[in-house]
Amino acid sequence: MSDSTSGSGIVLRPVGLRNIVGKMVSLVLGCQLLCCGGCGPSKEELMMRAAQRARPKSSDEKEESAKAQTQPVSTAIASKVVDAKAGVKETANAATTSAVQKAAKDSDANSPEETIGDWKPVSDRKPANPLGEPERHAKAVENLNRLTEALMAYKEDKGHYPPSAQAKAGIKTLSWRVLILPYLGHQDLFEKFDLNMPWNRSPNKELIEFIPDELISPERFDSKTNWMLPAHRNYMFGDNRYPRDRNIEDGIENTLMLVEVNDDLAVEWTRPVDFEPADLGALKGSLGDLRSGGTLVAWANGWPSYVANSVSTKQWTNAFTYESGDGQRAGAIHKEPDALLAANKPSRSETNVEAKVTGRVEASKVVENTEVEAESWGENRLPVPPSPDLATSNQRIEQLFGEQLVRAKQNQTQAELSNDFLKKSLVMSDDAAGAYALQNAAIDLAIDSGDFMLFQTVLDQHASTFEVDLYQVNRDGLLEFSRRNDVDEDTASQMAFVRRALVAIQEGLKRNDFEGVGRIASALPRVEEERRGFRRANVRGGKREVSAEKLVRILQTQLSSANKQYEQAAEKVAEYRKNPDDAELASALGRFYCFLKGDWAMGLPLVINGTSEKLSRVAKRDLEGANDAEDFLALGDMWWELSEGLPAGIYRQGTRDRAGYWYEQSLEVMPESLDRLHVQARVKEWQSQDPGSPLATIRTINRQLGLAENADLEQVVARKRTQVNAPGDDYEDG
């Protein structure tokens, strides 16, 4: 019989010869066992194991191996004679030492516990000296980018994001971190896993120490990882679902898909455990310890991000949840990871703060221009078509629909025609000018109809389609709607008009359009809350709340006064540009920005070198920032104490508002204590006082209307707008 070779590489000889050789081998082995019982595996055994490890298993072999729960790799580990760190161990039998060592080295050259490709166990990759904080941050950001790229590559390849865990018969076996290995460039490591076996059973458990570099925490350098998918049932990866873009109702750009958690939540990287906080109200306690003042995350569209610790629990919750309805956009909390690297410091006392507390603001940064360039807040918006093209399109609309426009006015069917125009515009993908003109006509018809709900729906769709200035179109639209209609006569329109107008006013204040916001405030309808359905608290702070109707009148008066103060501030801006070293001039401007506009980022650096020593001291401390509940409380108390010596008005209001801001931050993280009771009492007093500034008045009205106190136009539009799916569908208000 000729020699043949098995899949294992072992030569098979004729039976007779095999029997003779076998008897000789048995005799030798018996002698060795008699001379050195328990001295370890023989050369032949080690070579056999090496051969078994070297050849790939068939699917049948894998199945049988799984049933027996013993793999060649586990056998090798149980009886290995080579130590990765210390070299070859001495055996009890000196006569066989060299042979055993040679066989062990040969067999373990490809063993998973020693090396995978060029990799070593994580313990052998640990740097000689601990990394400094800048190095740790840089490594973490690099890991974030690599993991994000891998997740997006997986989605592009599979058509969906990975599930949080590989599962067999409904039982989670391995983490998503294993599933993305090929997309990290680690196919060799991926192929050594048995996806049907649990993470802590062979062969998978022997691979834990080969954690990829991208998952290693630079704070520890062990086999645990801090990188997790949000897996609560309300989050994107909850219930081990296979998320697809269309299932992310909030939009992939507004929903978090990856987060770096604190060390106490870190798990072995192959373990199918992710971020699933039991108490959503305390989820902030799981984040923000590793990086200076924030947490590294990634949005589901692949954008890496850095979120500050000052972000509220509600904002975190809105970012993690994928269902529609909260209206929060990523921009509300997003920072580029470069912000972390640029700081390179763990606390507020470093040089990045030093630049802010010098009291110098570039004169070019202080602007009085009311014309603010429109920001591109929406994705895939179209440029506004050129004027000649729009003029042509308007003429064609008059030719095509002139008779319908006349009949609509006669028959009071403007709403129907507005709806029809909007639908037609949304399918005109090759005629931007025509679509723009039709939408303008739809807005005009909606105004004529007197249906404010329809008007804001059409307006929001227009602003979502084209790169128009969101504030400008809302300001002009509100004023025109008020001019043509009596909003007081319709309850629903009255409520909707007030809500939208207040948000527009807040945006106008940011843009220094005091004249425009004053006109919007003058257009506000009468607010008779008992008849119109406004909520009104019974008693707060020992006195009845000011009625919404009175608050509107107060706001109108305040905005008129603010416009005059802005004109004075504009003159100071011109002087400041000529004399940027004039500390008192800078301080006057700073007070305007802080206390009237609520722009603390611009105002605080300007006031710190003014003549008011108390204000300067508190402002300087505020610029240094805060990291924990104790800091938040201290800053709140400093601003509150400063307010005690001020007369009623915008300055007292402004200092109380700033104190309230820091108090609310402290309540997010402060445990039940006397300090917490102190803060709650201060917040209650702050909210019960008569508002002394436009921003405070708007905030108070918003509370009574149930409107988010910090809502902006982008959030409102994102929440209210609904898409028309196809021509002929009924158009619904969001």
Image (cartoon, rainbow, N blue to C red):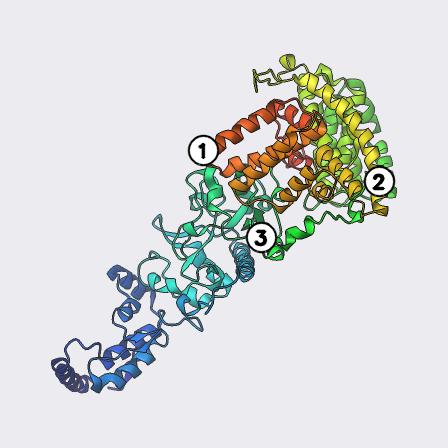
Foreground: disc 3 or disc 2: 3
Q: Does 69 appear above or below 239?
A: below
**Pointer 2 residue:** 390
Q: Residue furthest left?
A: 34
Q: Secondary structure at mark 3?
A: loop
**Pointer 3 residue:** 302
Residue type, numbered disc 1: Ser
Of the 4 image quadrants, the one containing the C terminus is top right
Of the 4 image quadrants, the one containing the N terminus is bottom left
Q: Nearer the viewer, residue 433 or 85?
A: 85
Residue type, numbered disc 3: Gly
Distance in Å between CA atoms under marks 3 and 1: 41 Å
Residue at 30% x, 74% y is: 52
**Pointer 1 residue:** 673
Q: Does 324 appear above or below 289?
A: above
Foreground: disc 2 or disc 1: 1
Is the Cβ of the residue at disc 2 closer than 8 Å to that at disc 1?
Answer: no
Distance in Å between CA atoms under marks 3 and 2: 37 Å
Query: Which mark sits nearer the N-terminus, 2 or 1?
Result: 2
Q: Secondary structure at mark 2?
A: helix
Distance in Å between CA atoms under marks 2 and 1: 64 Å
Query: Whole-percent x and y of residue 60?
Result: 30, 64
Residue at 51% x, 61% y is: 183
